[in-house]
Amino acid sequence: MSRWREAWHQAVLESEPLYLFTRSPTAVIAAGFLSIILLAVLLAPWIAPTDPYDLRTFDILDSLLPPVWSEGSDPRFVLGTDDQGRDLLSSILYGARLSIMIGVGAIVFAILMGVGLGLTAGYIGGRFDMIVMRIADVQLSLPAILTALLVDGIARGILPREGHDRLMFFVLVVAIGLSLWVNFARTARASTFVERNKEYVQAAEIMGLAPWRIMVTHILPNILGPLMVIMTVDLAVAVLLEATLSFLGVGVPADQPSLGTLIRIGTSYMFSGEWWVVLIPSGALIALIISVNVLGDFLRDALNPRLR
Amino acid sequence: MALLQISDLHVEFASRFGVHKAITGYNLKLEAGEIHGLVGESGAGKTTIGGAILGLLPGAGAVTGGTIDLDGLNLTEMSENKRHALRGKRVSMIFQDPQTSLNPLLTIEEQLVETIRHHLGLAGGAARDRAIALLQEVGLTDAKARIIDYPHQFSGGMRQRVVIALALASEPDLIIADEPTTALDVAVQKQILKLIRKLAKERQVGIVFITHDMGVIAEVTDTVSVLLDGQLVEAGTTAAVLSDPQQPYTKNLIASVPRIDQRIERFPELQTAKRERADAAFQVDGASAGFASDWLLSGAETPAGHDTDVLDVDNLSVVFSTNRGLFARADELRAAKNIGFRIGAGETLGLVGESGSGKSTVAKAIVGIHPAQTGSVTLFGEPLEVRRRRPRQDPSRRQIQMIFQDPYSSLNNRWRVENIISEPIRFYGLASDPADIRRITASMLSLVGLPHGSLLKYPHQFSGGQRQRIAIARALVARPTMLICDEPTSALDVSVQAQVLNLFKDIQAAFGLSILFISHDLPVVRQVSDRIVVMRQGEAVEAGDSETFFAAPTHDYSRMLLAEMPSTEMLADPDELAGPADHSI
């Protein structure tokens, strides 16, 4: 036991971000919160009381039951039910799972595209850089939600009707990823500009290493810091974008609700007394976004010595 | 009554590694009109003492003991408000880099008048007249006309004069000058030092002069104190300390200073207090410095005498063109004009010049990372591509290796030392068996004097000198015939520089490498070079044998350069200082 403690102590001393992390209560709380959410969401199929995707498990007679601490509740449904009689707790667990999966997928897509283009543009420079950055400028002048709606609309138009629901996941990932890649491209390009003039890159060039090898093995590990910051901040944005799209009704289908879909369903009952249908999923979304954002802020401060 | 009296000063910094004692028991007595030099290597605590006097220690630092007495006022017990009123008024500061210590958005008039109004209470025309008088005093020609200029319109030396005028504007009693000439070229440095000396005497200002450069200390200070790890090693009048040092550390420090007037074959190896923990625990079997030299020699090309040219550079010209915008025409700048020289086997050529003279450009053209417009470069008689991108498989890529100026940027911080050194082995296919590669890599570390345990560490765990050793190991492991060193010691402390210069000499003696040694530092070049080429604004103005050059330079510019070097005459003779040195590779 003491060996582990010693090792942890040593790690904290050696790594500045880790040291700052242990000294920042907000970051620790946010990280704790996020791990609880992530754990609950990952284990959703095992810990959720019901399966909200299985139409046979819910009964319209159970619809709009309030949470257990309110009058007229049913102990079977801890957080109450929605208009279909679905258990809200299970819906939120599954919904957040879908939201996070789409968010993470979109970020991975944005990283692959953005870092790939940004790194190459920053390293090669010249005409390629100019073209990529002008495309990025165009992309930036479109609001993210518009890009996502556009991709979504096109996908709906060209994809066959029957496979639609199944493909919706990937359409959302691409739609959200496309509206976020610019952040990664710009950051990667700017950091690459700084790194490429350093002497270790010149040393690699003198050796005659292939450009892709210099980019991937030498420069990429050195620009990961700022990219990680963008990644956390944009993860929150991606989850929010997914919620927005689903709220607008162009996201995932209603029989597989994500957080955004749940909130959309809830809004119709907001003023008729069934507040829990909208407020509880919204609260879950807010908690998720805030903890990711707080962690992102912390990382930005910890990895950028100039801000300290 | 002394102007400034510091007794038994202690400064501590709290950090996550515990309390760091930055200064322990420092004493100083400074009279008006006196210049006191604070000298020591990086991390010795020079700047911390300056900060403690001004009351401007960085966040975690605090004075934990002792007194700082300015003209009867005890600064350490004073309230922050009172100290604030004192700063700028009675104590002011000259910073290292004139590029950043002036506000680029204000004219120098605005900056000077602001200070004068605030501290002397003069207004409008009177303050302006005062500012002009100050600028004339610091030797700014045509001060009346130039006072309305912005900082970027001045050259580096002129800007530092403005910074000095700004420091004098409040008529302080004490000035802290933190490396005020380090960012300047030698010719400018000499003038600024003269100016500081003159002002101290005329205005009876006490100056605490912080520097790492023994030559500057000899040139400008009256008294000096030598610091090592926050402790005062030795103090006294400059003449006494430099010509007859008492402490072993001071002796070694002075013996490590390269001299312009003589060539030292071997520098003493200074053991600094930052000692390595012995990493005896990690050993690679069969790896040793001997194995490394056998391995390096086994791949060497046929050895040749001095009469064979290894590298022949002829008529090399490099033109930089500024980035052409959509509508603007590209501007051209000739960075190197018709440069030619040749380097024989086992020979070292020193390429000398001030900043911006085109030295590094020539090196980049030779290694093929910057295209040249005209000229040719041949290696063993084989022409190398210099106008266009050199083929990646070109054998010269292995035969010519480069060592860079800044060891903090020349190593990939995210790579382990093992990967950094073994990359050339794997890339050039010099060995294939992983066990062999590891043995060679560990042996290279032994060769440059680092423990095998370094293999598993990352560059940030090493000091500047150790990093430069790693960079040297990386260059050597490719088994080059030609080594290009671009200012390889300018980022290093003088004692570390001595070690690295020794290492270069050892390597050259053992493997017969040819070296192109680029530096602005004439004394250093003298220590290593067989022949010298002097560059100025892209042109080679003088070339010749090193010893003849230093004895009797022919070109006016070379003579000027030599004359501007801080004199090392006052420094004790290294032969008397050095103990018996026995080092072999």
Image: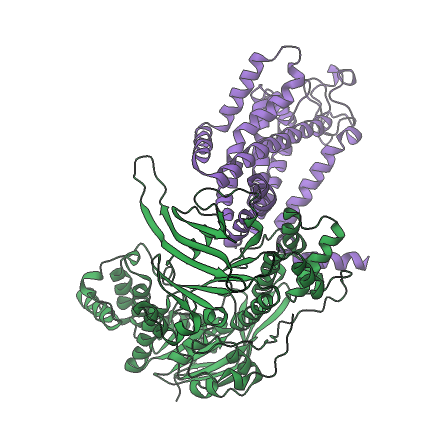
Chain colours: A purple, B green
Q: Residue at x 48, y 81 (%)?
A: B225
Left or right, residue B571 beside residue B299: left
Q: Is residue B38 above or below residue B356?
A: below
> Is residue B21 visible in this depiction of the protein?
yes
Viewer-closest of B116 and A171: A171
Give the x, y percent position of residue B228.
Answer: 55, 77
Q: Residue at x 53, y 24 (%)?
A: A148
Q: Quadrant of the N terminus of chain B?
A: bottom left
> Is residue A275 visible in this depiction of the protein?
no
| Quadrant in the rendering for residue B53 | bottom left
Viewer-closest of A240 and A60: A240
| Quadrant in the rendering for residue B341 | bottom left
Q: Quadrant of the C terminus of chain B?
A: bottom right
Give the x, y percent position of residue B309.
Answer: 49, 58
Give the x, y percent position of residue A154.
Answer: 54, 16
Q: Count numbered badges in the picture.
A: 0
Q: Residue at x 50, y 28 (%)?
A: A144
Q: Is residue B483 above or below residue B80?
A: above
Give the x, y percent position of residue B193.
Answer: 35, 74
Viewer-closest of A278 and A136: A136
Q: Is residue B200 above or below residue B141?
A: below
